[in-house]
Image: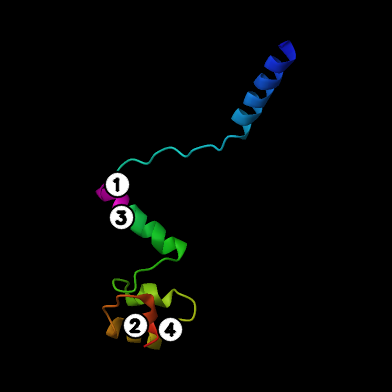
Amino acid sequence: MRLARYLILLIAAALLVAAPQTAPKKSPPDVKSAASSAASKAESGLLDINTASEADLKKLPGIGDAYSAKIIAGRPYRAKNQLVQ
């Protein structure tokens, strides 16, 4: 009986140690965080092709003056596959 209790306690402790850690909940976005999130997206390589400036588009690999001008001329896009057309 005593051995069974220790075994159950040992299993419970192992499960608690192996449990995944949850990330803290984020607070609702405000105006300041919206501007910082837009800046972080630009740093991470994500860019909205409908609102990006010519300079932002030129920062992308393989995009120069001609391609950035074509992208801007073809706006608005509904999907990224429309760039091919």
**Mark 2 nearby-residue class (10 Å; few <14, some 14–19, many ≥20):** some
State the mark number for residue 67. none
Q: Nearer the viewer, mark 3 or mark 1?
A: 1
Say what secondary structure mark 2 lies in: helix
Q: Nearer the viewer, mark 4 or mark 1?
A: 1
Instruction: Identify the residue at image location x=34%, y=53%.
Output: 36
Label 4, label 3: how far apart the Cα atoms are: 26 Å
Label 2, label 3: how far apart the Cα atoms are: 24 Å
Kindly identify which residue carries mark 1.
Answer: 29
Q: Nearer the viewer, mark 2 or mark 3?
A: 2
Do the CB atoms of the residues marked 2 and 3 lie less than 8 Å apart? no
Kindly identify which residue carries mark 4.
Answer: 64
Residue 85 in the image, given as x and y percentages of width and height? 36, 88
User: Along the polypeptide, which appears first: circle 4 or circle 3?
Assistant: 3
Q: Amino acid at mark 3?
A: Ala
Q: Amino acid at mark 1?
A: Pro
Kindly identify which residue carries mark 2.
Answer: 71
Label 2, label 4: how far apart the Cα atoms are: 11 Å
Label 3, label 1: how far apart the Cα atoms are: 10 Å
Q: Amino acid at mark 2?
A: Ile
User: Along the polypeptide, which appears first: circle 2 or circle 3?
Assistant: 3
Quadrant position of residue 42 = bottom left
76 over 8 or under it: above or below? below
